[in-house]
Amino acid sequence: MPDILVIDIPSRYAAPSLPLGRYYPIVVEALAELDEIEAFLCAERSSPVVPDLFDRRASALNSNAIIFCRYAPPDPDWPILLLCHWPANFTTMVAAASDFFARGCYTIEMFASIDALDKAERRLLATLGRHQPVIVKPISTGLSLGHS
């Protein structure tokens, strides 16, 4: 799964449209992209610029499965992330998919607690199960963030 760079947006630029009102996640799939995003973030600017340079790039991940991946926070004050990879048969059902899915296939949600993440995950799985059978295969990452 990719890395996710999370930017804590200063309060003067934060907005309710951002996850938890203040974070901007960036999906990073390759080492070269780390250099690219660092150069982007360090560039001199006269005004703020949305760091969306990877959002419209095609993903390197190709899978026919829906993949949920939890990312533990590096610090207790940071959010817990849920990255979902959606295969093309799901993304093509969404109008304006390029505005909805990062890199054409990812959604990212952020939560202040593991309980909130668990609740959202259960709701999403229940919704998916209404349309077709859902098989969940846990993949151990060595992280303990709640139930498997």
Image (cartoon, helix red, strand yellow):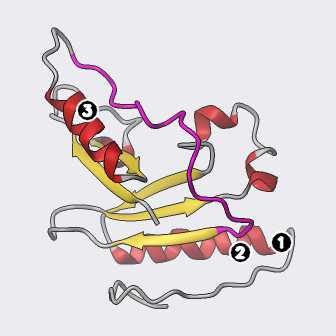
Q: Is residue 62 magenta?
A: yes
- Which region shows up in magenta? 48-66
Task: List the residue tagged with mark 2.
Answer: 126
Label pair 3/2, CB-CB below 8 angstroms: no
Instruction: Please tell me in which quadrant of the rendered image residue 127 appears.
Output: bottom right
Q: Residues within 10 Å of mark 1 (few under 14, many from 20)?
A: few
Task: List the residue tagged with mark 3.
Answer: 14
Left or right of 104, for residue 146: left
Label pair 1/2, CB-CB below 8 angstroms: yes
Q: Is residue 108 magenta?
A: no
Rendered image: mark on residue 130:
1
Q: Position of residue 36 (x, y in %)?
A: 29, 36
Judge by depth and name the residue closer to the eye, 62 or 115: 62
Q: Residues within 10 Å of mark 3 (few under 14, many from 20)?
A: some
Callout 3: SS: loop
Q: Position of residue 109 (x, y in %)?
A: 45, 56
